[in-house]
Image (tube, grey):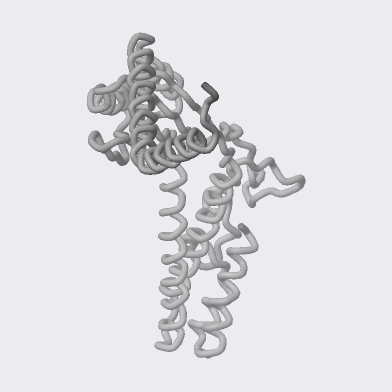
Amino acid sequence: MVMSMVAAGGLGAAVLAGCGGSAGHSAALRAPVSAGAPSGASSPGPSSLGTHPLGTPSPGASSASGTSLGQAVTPLAPQIIRTGDVRLRVGAGKLTRAFEDVSGLATGHGGFVASSDLSPGGPDPSGQLVLRVANAQVGAVLAGLHHLGTVTAESIQGTDATGQVVDLAAQLTTLRSEEVAVRTLLGRAQNIGDILTIQNQLFSLQTQVQQLTGQQRTLADQVTYATISVELTTATTPAAPSGTLARAWALAGHHVVAVARGLLLAAGWAAPLVVLGGIAGGSWWVLRRRRHPNPT
């Protein structure tokens, strides 16, 4: 962070040295850059530099007052992003009620429903909900889901975001320190070219601070509230044994009818052949009797 301050001060000093040559510029360039420090003041102390979130004291590093820089602070608790997926099967005709119960389960534990979709009609009625609940309430919400139906699948994942949280905080601390230093240079600048150049640098720093602040808020939301996706389906009602037997008999009867129809159709096609065969056989028998009459 000290290097960032020096770099920001060096940039402003170079701008002022290149564009102005008055005694006021020279005095400004010789003055150390610090957040609101008067001209001729000593190097900034711990209050202006800040400390690293998980830093430890640097050996031998001290400010003008003798206080160590980068003082140790209480270690940051693990920052965990928790996500989960649950598939819940409910009884036939109970989908809408279960959908409302899942929504009420989230709000009842201090959370909310981020998105939802319900399709109660059609051959495959279903519903989907995305719940956001505090990490401390995840266990209670999962237990509640088990009481609403049959959980056919469940998975919970955790991602450690502690490093991201610390890194964003450190970047913001550095950028804000640079912003303060550049504002100090802007207050000392007298040349129009110097002012425009420093203002551009200040605008760039402010943009970066806003972007990182947005990322920090998003990450804090993900760490604070777990995301649980719930998919609702309905169970198919199993048929009773008597119903199965009835369907089997009905199917067998259908097959018997089909076979009988086939036989009748085959007989219809074969009837002329049978008649012709009978006529031919009778004629042959008559001729044979005539040629070979029975002896008297």
**Which of the 4 image quadrants contains residue 243?**
top left
- Residue drawn at x 53%, y 83% is 15
Pinpoint residue 155: horizontal percent, then vertical percent: 52, 30
- Residue drawn at x 46%, y 33% is 85
- Is 101 situated above or below 147? below
- Is 263 situated above or below 64? above
Pinpoint residue 197: horizontal percent, then vertical percent: 46, 82
Can residue 172 be seen? Answer: yes
Can residue 225 be seen? Answer: no
Pinpoint residue 254: horizontal percent, then vertical percent: 34, 26
- Residue drawn at x 66%, y 44% is 68
- Among all residues in the image, which is located at the extreme front? 296
Q: Is residue 1 left or right of residue 147?
A: right
**Which of the 4 image quadrants contains residue 88?**
top left
Residue 258 or residue 270, whichever sits in front: 270
Q: How many marks?
A: 0
Q: Quadrant of the N terminus?
A: bottom right
Residue 75 or residue 196, whichever sits in front: 75
